Image: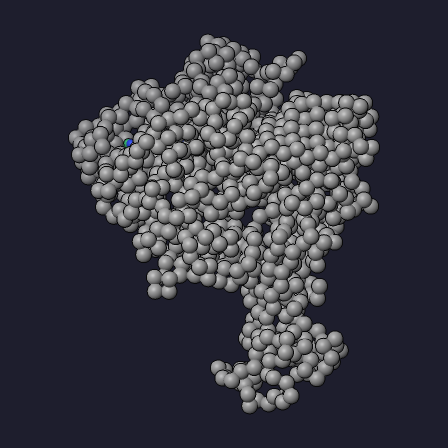
Amino acid sequence: MKPPPFEYHAPRSLGEALDALAGAGEHGKVLAGGQSLIPLLNMRLVAPAHLVDINRLAELAAVDVEPGGVRVGALARHAAVERSGEVAAAQPLLRQALRLVAHPVIRNRGTVVGSLAHADPAAELPAVLALLKGSIRLARPGAVRDVAAEDFFTGPLESAMDPGELAVSAFFPAPPPRSGTAFREVARRHGDYALAGIAALVALDDEERITSATVACVSLGPVPVLVDVTEAVGHRPPESADWASAARAVQDRIEPEADIHATAAYRRHLAGVLTEQALRDAAREAVGA
Amino acid sequence: MTTKLFGEPVRRREDPRLLTGRGLYLDDLAPGALQAAFVRSPHAHARIRDIDVSAAIEVDGLVAIYTWEDLPGALAEPLPLLIPHPALTHGRTAYPLAREIVRHVGEPVVMVVARDRYLAEDACALIEVDYEILKPVVGVEEAAQSAQLVHADVPGNVGAHLVQEVPSTAGLGAREAIDAAPHTLAFRLDIERSASMPLEGRGVHARWDADDRSLRVHSSTQTSTSVRMAIAAKLGLPLPKVEVVAPDVGGGFGVKIVHPWPEEILVPWAAITLGREVKWTEDRREHFVSSAHERAQVQSVRVGFDDEGRILGLDVEILHDHGAYTPYGIIVPIITSTQLLGPYKIGAYRVEFSSIYTNTVQVTPYRGAGRPQAVFCMERTMDHIAEHLGIDRTAVRAANFVQPDEFPYDQGLIFQDGRPLIYDSGDYPESLRLLKELIGWDDFPGLKARAAAEGRAIGIGIGCYVEGTGVGPYEGGHVQITSDGRVHVSTGLTSQGQGHETVFAQIAAAELGVPLERVSVVTGDTRRFGYAVGTFASRAAVMSGNAIALACRKVKEKALRIAAEALEADPRDLEIVDGEVRVVGAPGSAIPLATVAVLSNPLRYAFDAEAARATQFAGASSFDRPPVAEGEEPGLEGRDYYSPIRSTFASGMHAAIVETDPLTAEIRILRYAVVHDCGNLINPMIVEGQIHGGVAQGVGGALYEKMVYDGHGQLLNASFMDFLMPYATEVPFVETAHLQTPSPLNPLGIKGAGEAGVIPVSAVIASAIEDAEGIRIDRMPISPSDLFDLRRAAPGRSTAGT
Ligand SMILES: Cc1cc2nc3c(=O)[nH]c(=O)nc-3n(C[C@H](O)[C@H](O)[C@H](O)COP(=O)(O)OP(=O)(O)OC[C@H]3O[C@@H](n4cnc5c(N)ncnc54)[C@H](O)[C@@H]3O)c2cc1C
């Protein structure tokens, strides 16, 4: 379990990094926290000819709380985002989700943007970005573009990012007023990728009736599945909301697959249970907000 | 025992070294050595048509490529069948490198040696092996019925078949006794594959000294003495020219008792051939597909019993999945067959097993070694009887216990050491009483009802076992006191982190009356002790512990004899306290052991001031005797061996309370209690540590670990990503109580403790889940997804939630 040969680039500036990546094109890979890439390299499942290590680019480590939301730089570690009180105040779902990502030692190295770039449908953060309708900023020499979450995740470990592009940051919009979020999942062991997970966002009007309820699903399809369940729960106060029909709506939308840890039927069942639980949790937060 | 060191919770002396990164594991040695890597079969069953190495030869830094064709002499023969048995009529072992046929994914085909491991793997990736794919045989039941053969000359894929039968006192066979019983039950049980999974995999380093024509090998092994003999035999070297050392070993759990592994003879051979140091460190993927697994069995049970639940007859048929080869013989199914009886007296017993070949990784002992399967079988049987009769599960067990006044108790079977299965001592009713108290068994129904009122499902489970430990044939100990007063203890068996450095030192310090700090212990180094068997079967403390105690007693006797002369006292009036030989009751007349050591070795040359006291003109005690008296040897040292007539039987009982989530089917262990009896405790803290580690592995086996093969014989979860071992977060706090019924078989009265913790866990958890859910649990491990399926299939049960 040693990686095949590659050329290692350690750029000192964003410009150098973009040049190196552009030069490598299809044969290049970004090395961020390495928590997903290094195992793939060691098992020789990927063999990039060039590895562009962005760990020296301190300028990418910023986490900025802006009026409209939180912008997370490419080198911001899971742990830094998880622990920031400012971030938690601006967008509580980030901390709620990050606590479920792996273990502290992995969160100390793994990056939020790396997780999004990796586009694993079993990962929490892509679901968070999808639920919040956030975006990813991609750069190449002389060009920057923002891609919305719904366009970014195109398949398991597949994204709209082009070869040679660097994801420089991700933007997680702040929640609407009188809203609440929650993340619920079932994993085989503490910190494992979820067998199924649900991120929920519920917003209320001034009479504390539900105006919008949406969930994003983890490990229940090839990409994070976003389901608007506002219709299903009804324009009602949370106490009388029809959570069960929201759960059914989600179960109808997802396409879970079986693997060695769980059958598709069990995953579908979990999706229902977790949808109800996450929506209730989010509604409870919204009432308090 | 002379001092209180024996039985004290002395802190582990190896821990500061091991916990601060100062351990020396195999891969820490010889950083400059050449490194080996292997091309391993990607197919479960195939014929090798051609091996093309032309592209690999171009790799810069490549040193050598070897295939079976290159192997000389005995190296080209199949690996040894370590434990032959008359019932193993079709034992088969692999070649060090595949010869023509590969029989499981991961079988080594080509060995590559290069400047470093990266380059070796680069070269491996460029070697093209042309395979003709053959149909694989996967799954033990499929293999038992399949026309496809794993070995062309093994009909029915049956490697071994063995029936053992113990009739009732009235002379009834088990089947007759069952038919005649008031109640009978029949059911089937399934246990999945798991594996030892030590943190450190296997590894070998070899250095050939061309001038001296000698070989030094380091191996991450559980038996350095036997690896040494295997290497000498396979490479045709004189035994005194081969030394094998086990460095710090990061866990073994059984897989490293198997030997010689292909790499253990190939790496030394390459080192000799190339005249360079060569090293190979197993990586995790290799460990999954190229070492060994255990556990997989299918059991068919029939039992007959009376109204009190006393078992009148028990008939068990076992299909044992042995994987592709049988290097370790049929030890695992023999242990299952014999240890199945646990702490119980069974009216009549019949057990039959077939050891079946499949195109999967070979099966050899993993901590517990066949006992978890055995206990699962017996304890599921007990629970099913209790359910059938509507009586308490502990009452059924108590009704069947061997009673304290019935020892020694002969179960009428032949155990894994080829000797009769006779329990030496124990107190099962007391053990059960302690366990029920510890877990609160009698109060549980109230707890369960209260939980149910809150919408929670909890259940309690129990499991009992007896473990034959300390199997022979022997171990030895050597103890030397040098003229600086230090005590050097060595034994041939190896350590994998169990705490031998501590407990063996405790034994020596207690026996000799010296401070613990003066004692150092060396294990698993053939340069220090050449005769040994190995570390397995919970035998190290019993075997080497007693041998070291006996060796200490020899040394002590000699020390007292020499000191008596110097002090002009009767040896019977002497004692050793704090490293000094003293006349009992006469303080002031004492002589340090260091001086005794000086006097024990008459010298011509003084190398220091102390030594001068033993030189020729220092004043001889007598001119009538030679300096070394007849029957004496120079030096204050002794060697002795312990060889028991048979195994000593430890026992224990575990109980757990689990909670099952009514919605998600997640399973959580709320409490876990252990009562453990391994005779006299040398170090209760180390015993508890062993139990905790065992329970952790047991939790893995019960709820998480499972080797998943697909129909093509591909192992689908050959990494820690998908082979789930419990983290600390999944392992419950273990509440422990000890019972000490000494073994009458050995001088220290001890029994083994190494494997105990893991043995009953699957049975206990199954019992508890069954209690919580009211659904039969006859297959382990069980995942939430499995439990969800069982709920849906259970008659009259609708799944709660959506
Ligand atoms: C034991 C373990 C458990 C884990 N459990 C979870 C879990 O439960 N949930 C979860 O979500 N994750 C889990 N992870 C993954 C972890 O969160 C990773 O850190 C994360 O997926 C990737 O982040 P990284 O910074 O380590 O990326 P890397 O491993 O460095 O890179 C991953 C991929 O993304 C690309 N990439 C990274 N950054 C960029 C960038 N800025 N621009 C373009 N491409 C980029 C890389 O080229 C590579 O292809 C686990 C990891 C481990 C080892």
Left or right of residue B304: residue B802: left
Q: Position of residue A123 (x, y in %)?
A: 41, 28
Q: How is the image coloured?
A: one colour
The residue at the point 35 percent across, 53 percent down is B271
| B185 vs A263, nearest the viewer | B185
In the rendered image of this protein, does residue B727 appear above or below residue A177? below
The residue at the point 61 percent across, 18 percent down is B791
Left or right of residue B706: residue B550: right
Q: Position of residue B790 (x, y in %)?
A: 60, 20
Q: How many numbered marks, from 0 up?
A: 0
| B98 vs B773, nearest the viewer | B98
Left or right of residue B120: residue B386: right
Quadrant holding the C terminus of chain B: top right
Q: Position of residue B426 (x, y in %)?
A: 75, 46
Q: Quadrant of ligand 1?
A: top left
Dividing the picture into quadrants, the one containing residue A138 is top left
- Residue B785 visible in the current orientation: no
The residue at the point 42 percent across, 24 percent down is B135
Dividing the picture into quadrants, the one containing residue A27 is top left
The residue at the point 23 percent across, 28 percent down is A163
Left or right of residue B513: residue B220: left
Q: Position of residue B555 (x, y in %)?
A: 63, 70
In the rendered image of this protein, does residue B771 appear above or below residue B121? above
Quadrant holding the N terminus of chain B: bottom right
Dividing the picture into quadrants, the one containing residue B24 is bottom left
- Residue B50 visible in the current orientation: yes
